[in-house]
Structure formats: structure tokens, C-alpha cells
Amino acid sequence: MPTLSQYESDNYLMLIDGISIQGYLEYTAGNYNTAKQYYKQAVYFGEKYFTTDTTSQKYSLAAFEGYGAVNRILNDYKTATKYIHKTIELAEKYHDYERIITANSDLALVYTDTKKYDLALFHIKKAESLALTKRKDLLPLVYNHFASVYHAKKDLNQTLFYFKKEHEADPETSETDKAINLSLVYLELHELALAKPLVVFLEKEYLNNHLLDYDRIQTLERLVKYYTQTRDFKKVAFYFDLYGEELDAFTRDEQQATTEDFIKKYDLKAKEDHINLLNQKNQLAENQLSQKNIAILIIVLALLLIVAIGLSLYLQQRNKNLKVEKQLLIMEDTLLRSQMEPHFVFNALSSLQGLIYEKQNQLAVKYLSKFAQLLRLSLEHSRMKFVPFKSEIESVENYLELQSLRFSNHFNYTISGNLEAVGSVSIPPLMIQPFVENAIYHGFANLDYQGELTITFEKHSDYVSFTIADNGSGIEASKNNTDKTKTSLSTTITMERLKSLVHTKNKIDFLEIKDNPDAPSGTVVLLRLPYVQTF
């Protein structure tokens, strides 16, 4: 380790502190790549000129911890763990209680991100124990990180408990932070009555332009989630569009700040060179020549860095655009499935109304019982993107039994396939029922013979195939017998969902509808659906 005069030591300490402060400001503004560059420079000086002096310890440990924290945000957990552990080790050696508490809290978040929850709880409890005896002013930070750990563990009650403890420990917590934290938990608990005043407050703050950039993004996430749960899809679409715009703007600002930072970085290098020159007065001429060589090297490195950073930023932007596109597709699928439910309920209630008008009371009661079972499954599936295969088959069976009762057993049906082979997979819900509905309402309409409907399924390597065959009137006859001003809403929605699945799942998805080759008349639907494996 080099020996420094008091003058040189003071200059390096000022440099470390100044760079770390700039890194912290960029970190709190959400410009993480820029913050990383500042902290990396501060760590370089901190490691090179670390001494047992109290001021040196303070500034160097701040640089080490900040560098670890920003690397966690950027998913470089190896580097994050290394520097946060280093901070704890040195802080414990020199009894820096503040740094021990904050570094253990940061390390808890690293282990939370990597799903090592036991280690995360160990370090956050260690931070809490020390804060209670040495630095109670740091308890709000500790409780906030406690909430983050339990939220990742999906323990929402504990998450809510520690968010409230954070607000109690810090009476000066802003109403915006309280609303953002608590609304997150209440929405995930589906406590809409408790979430509503918080969401209304955040919505007002957003519309009045009272929020910072990152708070605006978090607020829009809460608004989309709340109005999705309350089924106000007009507002969902409105705020989801704003969410995409805010996210793009946030990304552009970060990229611009990163580019400007690389220019500032070389000014810091010049300051370092100036300090080094103070120790080399007897070799001024040689140093001037060396400075020219360094300048050339810096220019070359700068060009290489700019190219590398440009490529990195391009890839980051592309990934974020893909993420937003995926979220839009997921939202579209949710909206489409929400339209399917009222369409089916309308048809079912119309059938029940017909039985009542015809005074078939016993049949109406049995029909109502089956309808209740089917409605329960429909509600359970409404918020799920994939449902267990057996549950979906149960739903189709209930539907067929309902229609069989409704039409006085005018048709027979069978469902066949190896249930054990598909017992551990899940498929998109409400994809089969629309085609069964078409066979009954269009294929079997006005038949003077017994209808036959068969459904067979088979599991393949990356999809499940379905064959839905009937001996009804066939495709052309159904078109002639159907009011051409009307179309099947459920089939239209199913086609749109299939198009979305092609984009969101790397599977083979297709639909084919043709005449039944094994019967004098009738229709065959061939459907392939992606699945996810469940255990």
C-alpha cells in the first residue's frame, strides 16, 4: 500500500467521497448503469488508498457498499455479494455500526433475489438486532427490507406487517410511499376496499404531475392492477398505454445519463493524473511524454467503450421493448377471456329460461345444479392463464351434460384419451368449449336423427392435440341455416386468443376445421394447444 502525505491523503479522500456521492445521486434517480460507473471508480481509489484512518474507512466502505447495491439491481449477484461481504467484514473490524446494519440489509436483498430466503432472513434479523440497540434511526430501512424479503416469499401478511412497522418507525414517511407500499399488498390480497383510497390518492397525484419518475411507473402498475381487478377495462387500457410510454421515457433518460457520464469519467481521470504529478516533480519532462501516451490510450479506450456501451444499451432497449410487448399480449389475453364469461352465461341462462317457460321444473332444477358447478369452474379459471388439464376436461363434461339435459338427450357424446399421460400438464382455459358449442347449436340444429359428438385428446412432446367430431349438418349446411348477420362471438374470441398464444408461447399452435370424412355429414375440428408442465 503506498505511503501518502497528509495533503495527498486528503485529496484522494475528497475524490472518493465526491465520486461516491455522485453515484448515490444517480442510484436514487434510477440511473443504475451510470451509478455503477461512478461507484466502480470510487471502489478503485478506495481499494488502492484504504487506511486505518476513520475518514478513509467511512468513504471507502460507502463506495464498497454502494457498488455492491447497484450490482444487485443490475443482477450481477456475484459482484454484489463480494463487495457487500467486504463491507461487513471491514465495518465489523472497525465497529462502524451504521455500515454493518445497512450492508446486512443490502445482503438480505441479494439473497432474496437469488431465492436463498433463509440467508436473507438471517442477515435482515442481524441488521434489526443491531439497529434496535445502536441505531434506531435505521429501523425504517431494515423494516422496508424485511417487507421485501417476505413479499418475495409470497407471505403477504408479514409483508403488510413490516410495511406498517416501517411507517410507524419513520413518521416522516411520505403519503406517496405509504400508498405505493400498502396498495401493492392490498391488491395482491384482493382487498379492494382497503386498496381503493390508496389507489385513488395515487391516481390523483399522478394526474396532477406530483410524482417522481420511478414513483410514476410504480403508480401506473398499481392502477393497471386495480382496474383489472375491478374490471374497468377502459381504464386498464388507458393506464397501460401510459405505463409503456413512461417506461420508454425512463429508459431513454437513463441511456442519455449513461452517455454523459462516460464523458465526465475522463475528467475524473485527469484529476487523478494531476494528483500523481504532485509526487513526480523531478521527472516532469518524462511525465509530459507519458501523459501524451496516456491520452492516446484513453482516446482508443474511449472509442472502444462507446462502441461497447452503445451495443449494450441497444440490447437492453430491445429486451425492454420485448418485455412491454409481452405484457401487452398478456393483457390482451386477459381481456379476451373476460369477454368469454358473459357470453357463456348469457347462453346458459337463456337455456334455463326456456326450461322454466316450458314448465319442466325437475329438469330446470337439475340444469341449474349443473350450471352452478360449471360456473364455479369458470370463475376459478377466469384469472388463470393455464389451468390443470383434468379441470378443463371436467368443465367441458359439465357443459355437455347441461346441453344434453337442455336438448332432451337429442345427442350423445364421448370424451376419450389417456388422462394419466396429461395429468401433470396445464393448458389455456376455455379453448375447447366454443367448438363444442358450435357443434350443438349449429351442427345438431334441426336434425331428424340422433347426434353424435366425440372428443379425443393426445399428449405430444410440446402440445396436446384435440379432435372434436360430430355427425351434424356439416359446414356448408350450417352456413345456410345460420343468420349471416350473426357470428359466433366465442369462436371469434378463441381465434384471437390462438393468435396471441402463437406470440407468447414457443409451441406449435393451430386450428383446422373441415368436413367429417368418417360420417355422411358433419364437421371435424383439429386443435393443437401448448401446455406447461406442472408437478
Image (spheres, rainbow, N blue to C red):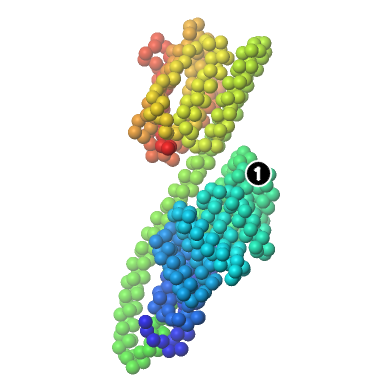
Q: Amino acid at mark 1?
A: Leu
Q: Position of residue 477 (x, y in %)?
A: 47, 13
SS label for mark 1: helix
- Asked where in the image residue 265 lies, by quadrant, the reply is bottom left
In this image, 308 relative to 485: left or right? left
Establish if 61 lies above or below 181.
below
Residue topped by disc 1: 192
- Give the residue at the far bottom of this rendering: 282
Q: Position of residue 287 (x, y in %)?
A: 32, 87
Residue at point 30% right, 80% down?
Answer: 293
Residue at point 39% right, 78% down?
Answer: 48
Residue 524 visible in the shown view: yes
* Front-most of residues 274 and 79: 79
* Front-most of residues 126 and 351: 126
In this image, 336 relative to 414: left or right? right
Residue at point 43% right, 76% down?
Answer: 46
Establish if 137 lies above or below 74.
below
